[in-house]
Every structure is written in C-alpha cells, then in structure tokens.
Image: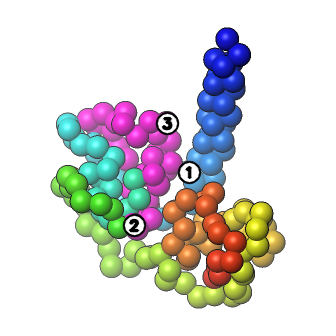
Amino acid sequence: MKTLLRLAILLLAAMIALGSVHGVVASGGWEILGEHTVRATETVYCIARAYGVDPWAISLQNDLANASLIHPGDILSIPNVPVALPQGRVCTRQFEISDTATACGDCTCQATHVVRWGETLSWIAIHYGADMWSIAQCNCIYNLNYIRAGESLCIP
C-alpha cells in the first residue's frame, strides 16, 4: 500500500511539474512555424520528422500529456525547435518552412556563462535578466532540465 501511495505522489508531482513547464512554453516560448492538422495514422514523431523539429517541443507546445494520444482532426502548433531525429516514418508536410525560421545557435551573444555545478537554466536566465527560452534556443538546448557543469552558454 505504501508503494502505491508513493507512486501516486510521484505521478502527481510529475503532472504538476509538466503543467508548470507548459505554462511557460505556451505563453510564447517558441516561434510557431505553422499548424498541422493530424491525419489518420499520424504520430507526433512522424509529424516532427516532417518539419525537422523536436517531438517533445510539439507535445509541450500543444499541452499533450501523452504524445501517443493524438487524434485525426487535432490541430497542432509546430514550434521552431530544430533537431536531428533518427530514421523513421515521415508524415506529409502541410506547410512549408520559411527560410527566415531561426535555427538553433543563430544568435548574438551579449555575454558568455560557464555553467557551475548546481546551476539551472532558469537561475542563469534570472541572473542575466534574459529569457530562458532564448538561451535554450541560442545554445541548441532541447531539454531545459539538462545542462552540464563546465558547459559554456551564449547569453543573447
């Protein structure tokens, strides 16, 4: 019984954490490349491969608690979070990506920060008065909870 209670508490904590991350992303974290209407048999991964973007960013941007639960007719906003994905099925694009879409790493640094052990991306953003999402895009960071001590970050 204690194990089940611990599992429920961990699940609740994860749901709260994901909800708070989504709130930041949905409020304008990434440039939106366009909208894609889900067709039968499409998955978030094949849609992500079609546009060359991170499937997790699609999930976060569209408040998908489970990326496997999309349905024909759902309209997904496709965020500008480029990533190289492994081989797999590729869905048909429903819009073309403009040449003006900002690629990761394409920015001008106002400062450079060497990550120290225990620092988080949100703390670094607050310290520099910068936007966490801009720092992530500028440094091609796709998991906002994963930065490494010793890594040098460009602060836009």
Per the image, the residue denoted by label 2 is 83
Say how the picture is coloured. rainbow
Residue 12 appears in the figure: no
Q: Residues within 10 Å of mark 1 (few under 14, many from 20)?
A: few
**Which residue is rendered at x = 30% and y = 33% of the image?**
71
Q: Position of residue 109 (x, y in %)?
A: 63, 87
Disc 1 residue type (three-letter): Ala
Residue 126 appears in the figure: yes
Q: Residues within 10 Å of mark 2 (few under 14, many from 20)?
A: some
**Relative horizontal placement of residue 95, taking residue 103 as reference (left or right):** left
Magenta residues span: 56-83
Q: Position of residue 105 (x, y in %)?
A: 50, 80
- Dot 3 or dot 1: first in sequence order is 1
Q: Is residue 8 above or below residue 145?
A: above
**Which residue is rendered at x = 69% and y = 85% of the image?**
112
- Dot 3 or dot 2: first in sequence order is 3
Figure quadrant of residue 51: bottom left
Tell us which disc is closer to us: 3 or 1. 3
Per the image, the residue denoted by label 1 is 26
Q: What kind of secondary structure does the magenta stretch mostly adopt?
A: loop
Figure quadrant of residue 129: bottom right
Q: Could you say which disc has been placed on residue 65 in the image?
A: 3
In reply to whether residue 67 is colored magenta, the answer given is yes
**Residue at the farthest top position:** 1
**Which residue is rendered at x = 22% and y = 54% of the image?**
88
